[in-house]
Image (cartoon, rainbow, N blue to C red):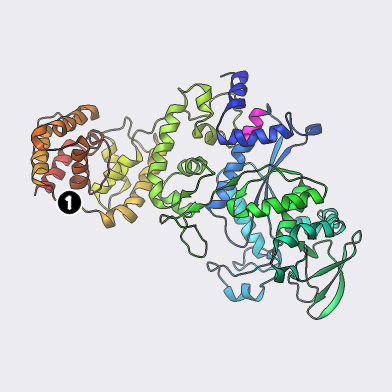
């Protein structure tokens, strides 16, 4: 692939990262003036620990960033991971220690609350450190920026003065969006009380915009107070707009629940003399019952849970697909995501460039900084055994199966069956054992075969008894296939025969290619499964 081929294909690619990047290309066809970087931003509220939503937003933004770099022939970019740690603590998270300590600091800026873990200078500093560790774990290229640093250092002071200068324009934008009761107390600026050090939600009057002086009621006393140098923060939608203008943000995506915020913050950004960034509004995740995922309900799926039962690459793959469509996010989607990721990865090297750019794996393998002119490392690599097949194997081995036991079976099927030679497969062996232990083994039930099914199983056992141990998976599949097609056994459709095999031998309504399973599990062991079913 040449640079010219890649650029030509990227310009017409329908993959969503390129669709998003073309929005920026209209703004900056060759990058920003004077070589300034195009700024991508992701936001994080450090009132809790990073989660799967944090990961998906940074990943998806990174993919748009790389697509823009491709389209603009290498224009400079930067990704800012912004922590809104000047926000006041509204509620104590249930999963935090020292609940009493945090309760005593309700309403205080997160960066001015003691760390309940007693490790960092504040609650926000602890969670910010967790965010950086989280992003570093996945190799993201980003710059960390915190609201407290920007407010306290005075770097946001000019922007705050801009809010005071344009006070009425901002009020005209926000007041029509509020209920009557809220209009009476709304203020774009949230001063920090000199008395209690809490972030106040009170009406504010501008006294001197250039000096940053405002007037408000502080627990019964009307005072004049300077909001510069970290003595106030802005209301959420105003803060978002101010940040876009102050940091020169060119691209930021967000969830569907912030649709109204995007519209109103965009208007405020224009009132401040800037403009809203380009961006994508993505759909939110649903649980296995089709309900919106809620932190308070605890019906979501954490990063740690996904990585217990599936690979990091499969998570990226699942998040890549159709970001504007609602998707279920629960452990049941993991096995398919793993196998589909490897299917796309195996195809990548042989695809023409146009198809490569539509392949999720091209984007995922390139997310952390390949040049893009050639295929990313790992393209075309094939997983020797599908994850689905691994799950079937450990399912018949039982809840107490071990990694060493699984690898002993893989020796029948995989060349050079050494974990060191197949690290990706070894990771999935560990994942499959965990998935089997927690979800398959507790509910596994093999049903008794019907009379015609028992006759067919006995015929399969007889065929396997006469088959060499070194028969290929394809040979074994043909044996299974021929029995299912034989009208003597009474299967109306071939899939009825395979369903019989899955339910009577594996205890599942779905399963692998049986030839591959028999080759992996072994002919003798498969005959034992048949004997158990017939007994």
Left or right of 17: which side holds 161?
A: right
Q: Residue at x 28, y 35 (%)?
A: 411
Left or right of 471: which side holds 63?
A: right
Give how far across and how far down residue 100 sits, in percent: 60, 76
Residue 67 is a magenta residue: yes
Residue 164 is a magenta residue: no
- Identify the secondary structure beneath mark 1: loop
Mark 1 crowd level (few <14, some 14–19, many ≥20, 10 Å Cα): some
Give the magenta range. Answer: 66-71
Q: Is residue 405 visible?
A: no
Give how far across and how far down residue 276 sits, in percent: 73, 46
**In terms of depth relative to the viewer, which is nearer, 482 or 276?**
276
Main SS category, magenta section: helix
Q: Residue at x 23, y 36 (%)?
A: 514
Quadrant, the N terminus: top right
Q: Is residue 187 above or below residue 80?
A: below
Left or right of 116: which side holds 522?
A: left
**Disc count in the image?**
1
Quarter occupied by residue 202: bottom right
Left or right of 479: which side holds 10?
A: right
Quarter occupied by residue 98: bottom right
Give how far across and how far down residue 444 sits, in percent: 25, 53
Quarter occupied by residue 88: bottom right
Q: Is residue 236 above or below residue 530?
A: below
Give how far across and how far down residue 263 sits, in percent: 69, 51
Q: Residue at x 55, y 70 (%)?
A: 97
Mark 1 sits on what residue? 447
| Extreme residue toward the bottom, this view | 220
């Amino acid at each position: 692939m040449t640079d010219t081929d890649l650029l030509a294909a990227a310009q017409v690619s329908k993959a969503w990262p390129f669709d998003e990047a073309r929005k920026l290309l209209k703004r900056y066809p060759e990058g920003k003036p004077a070589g300034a970087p195009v700024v991508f931003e992701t936001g994080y509220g450090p009132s809790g620990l990073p989660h799967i939503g944090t990961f998906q937003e940074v990943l998806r933004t990174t993919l748009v960033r790389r697509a823009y770099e491709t389209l603009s022939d290498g224009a400079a970019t930067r990704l800012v991971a912004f922590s809104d740690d000047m926000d006041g603590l509204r509620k104590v998270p249930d999963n935090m220690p020292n609940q009493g300590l945090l309760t005593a600091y309700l309403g205080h800026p997160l960066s001015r609350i003691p760390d309940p873990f007693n490790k960092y200078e504040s609650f926000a500093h602890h969670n910010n450190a967790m965010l950086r560790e989280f992003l570093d774990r996945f190799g993201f290229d980003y710059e960390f920026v915190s609201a407290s640093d920007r407010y306290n250092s005075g770097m946001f002071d000019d922007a705050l003065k801009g809010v005071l200068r344009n006070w009425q324009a901002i009020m005209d934008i926000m007041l029509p969006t509020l209920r009557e009761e809220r209009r009476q107390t709304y203020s774009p600026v949230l001063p920090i009380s000199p008395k209690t050090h809490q972030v106040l939600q009170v009406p504010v009057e501008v006294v001197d915009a250039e000096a940053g002086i405002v007037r408000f009621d502080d627990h019964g006393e009307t005072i004049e107070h300077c909001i510069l140098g970290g003595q106030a923060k802005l209301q959420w939608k105003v803060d978002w707009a101010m940040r876009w203008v102050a940091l020169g943000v060119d691209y930021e995506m967000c969830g569907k629940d912030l649709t109204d915020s995007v519209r109103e913050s965009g208007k405020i950004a224009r009132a401040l003399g800037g403009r809203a960034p380009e961006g994508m509004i993505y759909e939110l995740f649903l649980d296995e019952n089709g309900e919106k995922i809620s932190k308070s309900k605890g019906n979501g799926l954490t990063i740690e849970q996904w990585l217990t039962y599936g690979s990091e690459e499969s998570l990226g793959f699942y998040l890549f697909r159709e970001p504007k469509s609602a998707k279920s996010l629960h452990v049941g989607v993991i096995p398919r995501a793993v196998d589909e990721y490897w299917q796309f990865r195996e195809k990548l090297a042989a695809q023409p460039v146009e198809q490569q750019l539509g392949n999720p794996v091209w984007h995922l393998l390139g997310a952390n900084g390949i040049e893009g002119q050639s295929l990313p490392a790992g393209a075309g690599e094939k997983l020797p055994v599908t994850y689905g097949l691994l799950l079937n194997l450990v399912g018949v081995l039982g809840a107490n199966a071990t990694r060493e036991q699984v690898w002993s079976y893989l020796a029948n099927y995989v060349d050079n069956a050494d974990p060191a030679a197949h690290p990706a497969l070894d990771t999935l062996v560990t994942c499959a054992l965990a998935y089997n232990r927690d979800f398959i083994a507790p509910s596994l039930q093999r049903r008794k075969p019907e009379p015609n099914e028992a006759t067919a199983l006995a015929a399969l056992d007889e065929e396997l008894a006469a088959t060499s141990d070194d028969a290929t998976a394809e040979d074994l599949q043909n044996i299974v296939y021929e029995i299912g097609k034989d009208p003597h056994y009474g299967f109306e459709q071939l899939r009825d025969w395979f369903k019989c095999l899955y339910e009577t031998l594996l205890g599942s309504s779905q399963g692998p290619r049986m030839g591959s399973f028999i080759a992996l599990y072994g002919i003798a062991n498969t005959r034992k499964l048949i004997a158990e079913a017939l007994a």
